Amino acid sequence: MKFYKYVAVLLALCFLPGITWAEDVASVKLEATQIAERYSKSIVDVSTTIRYEFGAIEFGGSGFFIDESARLLTKAHVVSDPFEERGNASHLASLNVESGVKCWVVVGDQRVEKKYADLLTMFAAGGMTPASYEYWVVMGNRKYKAELVGSDKYRDVAMLRVLDIERKDYEPCKLGNSDLLKVGEEAYAYGTPFGLSKTFTSGHVSALHRYIDMNYVEDFIQMDTPINPGNSGSPLINSNGEVIGINAVVARGANNLGFAIAINLVSVEKLAKNGVVKIGYLGAEVML
């Protein structure tokens, strides 16, 4: 008799308003407006200043908070010396040259906008070793100093920690599982294209597991969600409000043909613990 009473109570609970099972919660889809509102305090502009003997260069991208320790993810090339390979631009800088991307050159009190292509001769001459790096995070009318926690140049991902920010002023993003993605799913980008902070765009996942020969280790999500220069480091978000990728690059000359690093490829724990993520090689093969 007691058994039937327990069953009756369980069935009654199932139909009570407000009671849902874990599977139902996980499958709830959010409206685009809900996602934009939820993460309005999660998305930041990332600015990097590298000082050299001649002066400094300034450039940046996007980023997003991932935990309550004020740590955020962005792209490694957003926080790295773009001309680290002396005599040549790095692969990412080469893409910037081809795309006509600009950065700021600061000499004394003068701040001039220049294309990466204009800097190639200067850096190819050598002797341009960085003297210092500065990282800043901008949220609305607030600007915060940040420090580099870790960098993974093989996957082009980096982690920053924002200093002196109060917990009420930011909201961490929820990281999802990119292995569960399906072609055709909705995908949203939230970043700073061309310096336009908190730009929200929508589209769909076009293909999975793309290899585009940009990083040492690759697993790209292809999408038609519009992204542009400045979106590097911004999150790609699914309809459940979970980050499933980090926006990386858009194909030149194409309409809405972009790529994001699958979030499962990011070693968050290693970035936080080791600072620099390294990969091992076995012959010519990369060991993940």
Image (cartoon, helix red, strand yellow):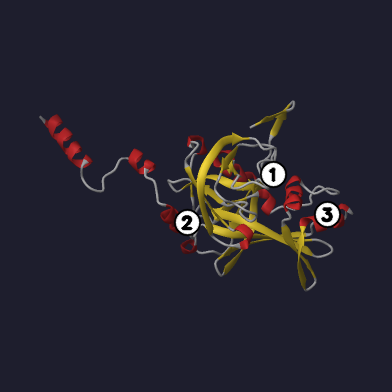
Q: Quadrant of the C terminus?
A: top right
Query: Tag 3: residue type?
Result: Leu
Circle 2 is placed at which residue position?
39
Which residue is rendered at x = 61% and y = 57% of the image? 193
Mark 2–mark 1 distance (CA, rounded to whole Å): 27 Å
First reached walking from the N terminus: tag 3 or tag 2? 2
Q: Position of residue 51 (x, y in %)?
A: 77, 62
Q: Could you tell me which residue is drawn at 54 percent across and 60 percent down?
A: 198
**Residue 4 location, quadrant:** top left
Give the labeled residue for mark 3.
120
Disc 1 designates what residue?
153
Query: SS at mark 1?
Result: loop
Direction from residue 121 to residue 139 in the image, left or right? left
Residue reaching furthest to the left: 1
Q: Which residue appears at 70% of the width and 59% of the height?
A: 59
Inspect the image, locate mark 1, and give the three-letter code of the amino acid beneath it: Lys
Please rate how many residues cluster around mark 1, counting C-alpha atoms within 10 Å: few if below 14, some from 14 to 19, many from 20: some
